[in-house]
């Protein structure tokens, strides 16, 4: 009989692959209501399972610090990216701030645990992932309290950034596990690719607005 850890791992991997496929489809179809919205919603459902099983693995089965950070990053930016579309130019709620602080605090705790344990981890990839998590959560909190009026018009760019962050986090986890012999490049490469695509999509959106 398979162990609970193995069952959790299989579910995690299967839904991670499903989320990657759905995320890719959401990127490829026209960015309008319809297929993009549908694939995006299914992507969020799949990534919710990925995050849930990932956190179970972290709590009960001692997952790697890098994967824990990726799970926190993917989970938070997926939620925040969805909320950005729901809110558009409206101010975020206090509940949104609470989720941002929970994600940031969890990242700090897992980073502290990683540093104080004997687990094998790569500081470069773990710190960079934590940095990405810190950046987006801090931005969301600062925007809510002080800069909402100034930044509310950029909600679509926020959505692009956050959803690309979620997709590249999943891709980093996949390539890091599929190509362990190329670490840390197999972990960092998808993040660099995601950043390039993110800038390209933002530039394209900016050109459309200027027309």
Image (cartoon, rainbow, N blue to C red):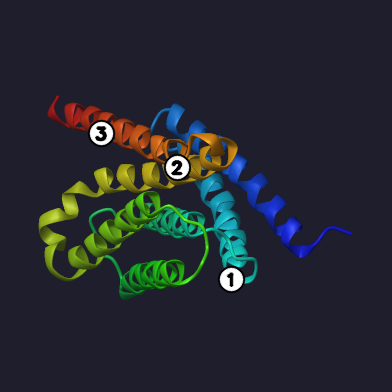
Q: CA distance from mark 2 to mark 1?
A: 23 Å
Residue identified by numbered label 2:
167
Residue 29 appears in view: no
Q: Which one is nearer the viewer's eye here, 74 or 123? A: 123
Q: Position of residue 52 (x, y in %)?
A: 58, 62
Relative to 203, is 37 on the left or the right?
right
Q: Position of residue 84 (x, y in %)?
A: 32, 54
Relative to 16, is 209 on the left or the right?
left
Q: Earlier in the sequence, mark 3 or mark 1?
A: 1
Q: Quadrant of residue 110?
A: bottom left
Residue 199 circle label = 3
Q: CA distance from mark 3 to mark 1?
A: 35 Å
Relative to 188, is 22 on the left or the right?
right
Quick check: marks 2 and 3 in contact, CB under 8 Å?
no
Check the image and name the residue furthest to the front.
118
Mark 1: give few (<14), some (14-19) or many (20+) Cα within 10 Å.
Answer: few
Q: CA distance from mark 2 to mark 3?
A: 14 Å
> Which dot, 3 or 1, sits closer to the camera?
1
Check the image and name the residue furthest to the left.
150
């Amino acid at each position: 009989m398979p162990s609970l850890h193995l069952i959790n791992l299989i579910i995690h991997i299967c839904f991670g692959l499903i989320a990657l496929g759905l995320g890719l489809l959401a990127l490829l179809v026209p960015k309008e209501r319809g297929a993009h919205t549908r694939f995006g919603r299914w992507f969020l459902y799949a990534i919710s399972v990925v995050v849930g099983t990932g956190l179970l693995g972290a709590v009960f089965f001692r997952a790697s610090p890098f994967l824990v950070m990726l799970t926190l990053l993917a989970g938070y930016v997926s939620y925040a990216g969805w909320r950005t579309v729901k809110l558009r130019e409206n101010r975020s709620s206090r509940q949104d701030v609470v989720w941002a602080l929970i994600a940031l605090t969890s990242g700090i705790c897992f980073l502290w645990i990683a540093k104080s344990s004997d687990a094998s981890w790569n500081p470069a990839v773990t710190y960079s992932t934590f940095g990405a998590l810190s950046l987006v959560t801090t931005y969301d909190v600062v925007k809510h309290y002080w800069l909402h009026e100034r930044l509310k018009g950029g909600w679509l760019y926020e959505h692009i950034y956050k959803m690309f962050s979620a997709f590249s986090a999943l891709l980093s986890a996949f390539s890091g596990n599929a190509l362990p012999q190329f670490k840390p490049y197999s972990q960092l490469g998808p993040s660099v690719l995601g950043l390039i695509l993110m800038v390209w999509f933002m530039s394209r959106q900016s050109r459309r607005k200027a027309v």
